[in-house]
Structure formats: structure tokens, C-alpha cells
Image (cartoon, helix red, strand yellow):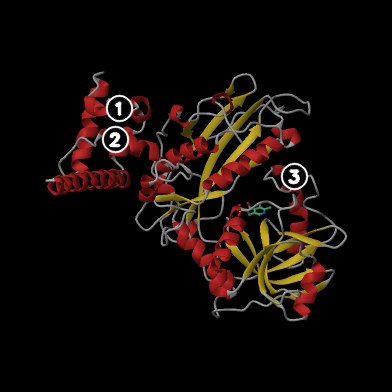
Amino acid sequence: MTFDAFKTFDAQELEIQATTCLKPLVPETELVFGKHFTDHMITVEWSAESGWNKPHIKPYGKLELEPSSVVFHYGFECFEGMKAYKDTEGHIRLFRPEMNMDRLNKSSARLGMPTFDPEELVKVITEFLRIEDRWIPSKRGYSLYLRPTIIGTQTALGVRAPDTALLFVIASPVGPYFSTGFTAIRLLATTDYVRSWPHGTGDCKVGGNYAPCVKPQSIAAEKGYQQNLWLFGEDDEVTEAGTMNFFMLWENFDTGRKELITPALNGLILPGVTRDSILSLVKSWEAEIGIFVREGKITMADILKAVEEKRMIEMFGAGTACIVSPIKCINYKGKDIEIPLGKTKNDSEAGPLTKRINDTILDIQYGVVKHPFSPSPSEILRDLKSYQVYNWPNIKMIELLSEAFSFISAPITKEIIKKELRIFWRSRTNNVRTTAVAAMRASQLESTLSLVLNSDPVLDIIIENLNEQQEATVLQQEESVEMTKQDC
Ligand SMILES: Cc1ncc(COP(=O)(O)O)c(C=O)c1O
């Protein structure tokens, strides 16, 4: 997708209105998914006439909408689910946020609503996270769930693409899905309702896909199954497990090799970020563990036969909320099919592959291992040009600050940076610009400077970056001295 200025909003124009009344934090032990919300929210308005307005961060609060707004009548709504994590060094990380942005654009376009430049929303979210820092839990498994949403706000009872829309992002701190080891789930295969159909919206994250799924899920719950298994077509093709992508590890009947298989993206399935990450990780382990990866059709007959022939090894659902959720039973047409779990520990109902996937993704999300799915802030600094993945802290701001302070030849310390920032702050108030900061985009800095002054992680990054630059300069100087000596 290409974007021009009219078709997107600009993160540089972000306006921040901080709340005057901070909410009390919720203790980690009391976190319930999606119950508590942070102090602020992001809003960006759009109209067909003038395009996207400036993005805003403002106190979390009610939206004012007329009852005739199209979102209430025709389901003009799409959303995303993603998380921000705090790594062991206290830096905030996002996990492949560009994938969520692309999917939100795809969903919005499918509903005839506007799209935006994904990088711009990631930048605004990055600012938002900096402001909501205290809400991001630092314990492994805990995170801040983000809910970017686009709704049609036009006030008209006509079914057509809305001429006004609102993009907003709210955030809720969440705890681990499995707090005491994995608990495998039992699924009821749904044969009398379908979630999606060819050329429908099953591959988009639109609100209209979710409400109709609640009834079949309640039926499953009434019968003692935690989720339902979605099927499609005459041959009962497996599509999704509740609101998760479906995976199974089995021995392929035709090839005899161990295979991790998941339904292909044929329009019936949501292209999960976790799904894509699992495929890529397990592919990279292929030589080591001898498990091949395949995207393809899976029918209930395939599952029944594999279980009967003892070729089924593990089965799980995958999604942002849980990463993986082991499956131990499917009820199909009144009969329970028991799925092997390949338990690793007594307290954990997950097979070795399921567990390894979960641990690896957690390690990436919390910065325990280096991986391009979640680069550390310093890795991003080294690769400023790519701008592919945005992460905390705001790269552009760090880049500008680092550039502005590159004249400092003394060892960089927090005190020096703070002093320079204060000079700049005062000079702005007096309407005088110092040469040191002349290169900086003052308007961008104005709203964020006071926050930077109080943010140790940001200062650490600036210092790290500046020290690296200084070391590089010293090295270059030494090299050129060496060269001169050789020339002589
Ligand atoms: C229907 C459905 N399938 C799959 C997923 C998993 O997607 P992701 O891994 O991006 O969270 C979700 C969750 O967003 C979902 O709602």
C-alpha cells in the first residue's frame, strides 16, 4: 500500500493532553483481562472531506456519538489486539506491531473505511506507551494489551461507506493467560454454524465476525468445552479454534515425516501474528528438530484417522492472548476424540514443541533473546535507517537528541544531557534558539521534553548512542593517525 499526506495522519503533529488525575494502578494479582484501562487514549478523526486530522493523546474517557452513528447500525468497526512488554532492562517493546497495523488497514479497507500509514500509528503508540509507562507490568507473562480500533461515525441511516470515522487506541494491563502451568483445553466442533466463508470477512478483524460466534461458544461452554472448533464445508475442514489459529503436530501419512500443520490462509482464517511467528520459528528449527512446517487443508477425517493410527502428536491454538493453548480433546458429532499431549511436566499440559514455542516467543517478547521480531532499542538505534519496526523509545526523538548533543566532547552523563535539555527548555521559553539544538525539530520536542527529563531509560539510550558515536570518532581519528604514520 502507498500513502500520501492526505491519506494518513502525521505522528509529528501529535497533540498531547495529559490527564490531571492519575488513576491508582491495579495490583498484578488483581488484573482481569480487559477490565482496567490506563489514564490516556489515542484518538484520530477522519473525514472524507479533509482526510485524517491530527492525532491526539488525551485522558481516557467517554466518546460522544449520536445514536444514528453508523457503527451502531451496520457494524462499521474493526480492531486489533497487540501487546507492549517491558524487558529485563526496563525498555518497552512491541512485538511485530507492523503486522497489526497492516491487518487493521486491511480490515478498515474491507469495510470501506480509511487506511493510514502504519509507521505513523506505531509512532503515536510509541509516544502513548511512554506516557503510560507505569501501566506496563514488568513481570514475565504480564503486559499492556493495546486495542487499536476504527469505527464509522457518520450520522446517517444509510448503508454506505461512512464519510467520517474515528481511530482510537485504548490500553489495559493484563496478566499471564496460564499463571500456573498450561491447562489443555477441550473443544466442541461446531457443525451447525460457520464463522467464515469464501470471499467473506473471515480473514479480517471486524467486530461483525465476533458477536455471532458467542452463541456457538456458549453452547460449547454449557456442554463443558472451553472453546469451539470452527469447521467449514462438506468435508468439515478445520478453520480456527475459538478465536485462535489452529495447529497440530502429526506424522504425515503420505510422507511419514513429522509435520507442524496449520490451515492455509484461504480467506476463511484470520492471518494471526502469532501464527506467522510460529511458522517462521519452527521453520528455522527444522534441521535441528526434524519437524517440517506446512500450511494446508486439515479435515476432521484427517484428525480422526491420525488419532486412530497414533500419528497425532500435539495440538494447540495460537494467538496474542495466550501465545499457545494446548488442546487435549475435540468433541465431534457427539464423540470425544482424545488428543495426545506429550506432557513434559506433571504441572504442565503442553507437549515439548508447544512448550518450546511458548518459551521462545516469551523470550523474544521480553528481550531475553535477540530476535528481529522485537529488536531492542539499541539495536534499532544501530539501524535507524530501516525504520521497519518501531519500538520504545521514540526513535526519531532519540535520533534528533543524539544529533543535537553530538557536539559534547566530554564523557556523556545523564547530568550533562539534563543540563543541556534544561538550557534548551529555557531558551524555548525565552524564544531564543541555541546553536546546539538548531537542527532539532522544536515543535516535536516541545511536548516531550519535560517527559524525557524524567525518563531514565530514554536518557540511557541517548547516552549509549552518544558514547558509541564518540568511540567511533576516536577510532576514526586513531586510524587516520596510523594511516598518516604509514604514509610517512
Ligand atoms: C479469530 C481469530 N483468530 C486468530 C487470532 C490470533 O491472531 P493473533 O495471533 O494476531 O493474535 C485472533 C486474535 O486476534 C482471532 O480473533
What is the CA distance from the residue labelled 3 to the residue labelled 2?
46 Å
Identify the residue position indicated by label 1 in the image.
439
- What element does badge 2 sit on? helix
Q: Earlier in the sequence, mark 3 or mark 1?
A: 3
Q: Residue at x 66, y 40 (%)?
A: 106
Q: Position of residue 192 (x, y in %)?
A: 85, 58
Q: Which mark is residue 403?
A: 2
Q: Residues within 10 Å of mark 2 (few under 14, many from 20)?
A: some
Q: Position of residue 39 (x, y in %)?
A: 46, 40
Q: Residue at x 69, y 45 (%)?
A: 204
Residue type, mark 1 in image? Ala
Disc 3 vs disc 2: which is toward the camera?
2
Q: Quadrant of the N terminus?
A: top right
Q: Are marks 3 and 2 in contact (CB under 8 Å)?
A: no
Disc 3 vs disc 1: which is toward the camera?
1
Q: Is residue 9 above or below residue 411?
A: above
Can residue 314 be seen by looking at this rendering? no
What is the CA distance from the residue labelled 2 to the residue labelled 1?
8 Å
Q: Which mark is residue 279?
A: none
Give left or right: position of 66 versus 473: right
Identify the residue position indicated by label 3 in the image.
201
Residue type, mark 2 in image? Glu
Give left or right: position of 392 versus 355: left
Q: Is residue 453 above or below residue 446?
A: below
Q: Earlier in the sequence, mark 2 or mark 1?
A: 2
- What element does badge 3 sit on? loop
Q: Is residue 161 above or below residue 333?
A: above
